Image (cartoon, rainbow, N blue to C red):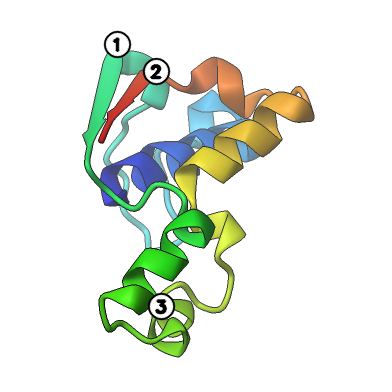
């Protein structure tokens, strides 16, 4: 989940700022990397859709309010599969920067 979010967020920064300035993040970190340099990404058994996994988390004893607090009360923008789906539906340039992604669960 976290690595998928990092890749997606970097792709968003790149499309907003352009490839030349994408290396500088808001915290002043200047290490350059681009999601387009990653060939493939594999996700194994993670919470890639927080909204869909909420009932299971609650069933296992994790209160919904805790999950919402961890996700800054924004489950959609912290769910990699939902973000990518939304980018694809809106024909966002972010999609072109993402590597081939495969989820195994």
The x, y position of residue 6, in whole percent, is: 36, 45
* Residue extending furthest toward the front: 59
User: Which residue corresponds to the image point at 48% horizontal and 79% vertical from the top-left?
Assistant: 68
User: Which residue corresponds to the image point at 38% horizontal and 26% vertical from the top-left?
Assistant: 34
Could you tell which of marks 3 and 1 lies nearer the N-terminus? 1
Specify few, some or many for label 1: CA neighbours under 10 Å numbering under 14, 14-19, or 20 or more.
Answer: few
The x, y position of residue 64, in whole percent, is: 45, 82
Q: Are marks 2 and 1 in contact (CB under 8 Å)?
A: yes
Above or below: residue 21 compared with residue 35: below
Nearer mark to the viewer, of 2 and 3 = 3
User: Which residue corresponds to the image point at 32% horizontal and 16% vertical from the top-left?
Assistant: 37
Q: Nearer the viewer, residue 23 or 49?
A: 49
- Which type of secondary structure does the marked residue at label 3 adopt? helix
- Which type of secondary structure does the marked residue at label 1 adopt? loop
Q: Which residue is mark 1?
A: 39
Checking the image for residue 99, the label placed there is 2
Above or below: residue 78 compared with residue 48: below
Q: Nearer the viewer, residue 98 or 64?
A: 64
Q: Are marks 3 and 1 in contact (CB under 8 Å)?
A: no
In this orientation, does residue 15 appear? yes
Above or below: residue 26 compared with residue 38: below
- Which type of secondary structure does the marked residue at label 2 adopt? loop
Q: Are marks 2 and 3 in contact (CB under 8 Å)?
A: no
Q: Which residue is mark 3?
A: 67
Left or right, 94 with reference to 25: right
Above or below: residue 67 compared with residue 75: below
């Amino acid at each position: 989940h976290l690595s998928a979010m990092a890749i997606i967020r970097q792709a968003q920064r790149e499309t907003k700022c352009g490839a030349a300035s994408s290396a500088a993040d808001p915290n002043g970190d200047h290490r350059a990397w681009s999601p387009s340099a990653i060939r493939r990404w594999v996700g194994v058994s993670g919470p890639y859709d927080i909204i869909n996994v909420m009932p299971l988390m609650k069933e296992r004893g994790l209160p919904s309010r805790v999950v919402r607090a961890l996700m800054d009360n924004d489950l959609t923008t912290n769910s990699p599969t939902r973000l990518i789906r939304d980018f694809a539906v809106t024909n966002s340039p972010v999609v072109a920067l993402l590597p081939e992604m495969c989820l195994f669960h």
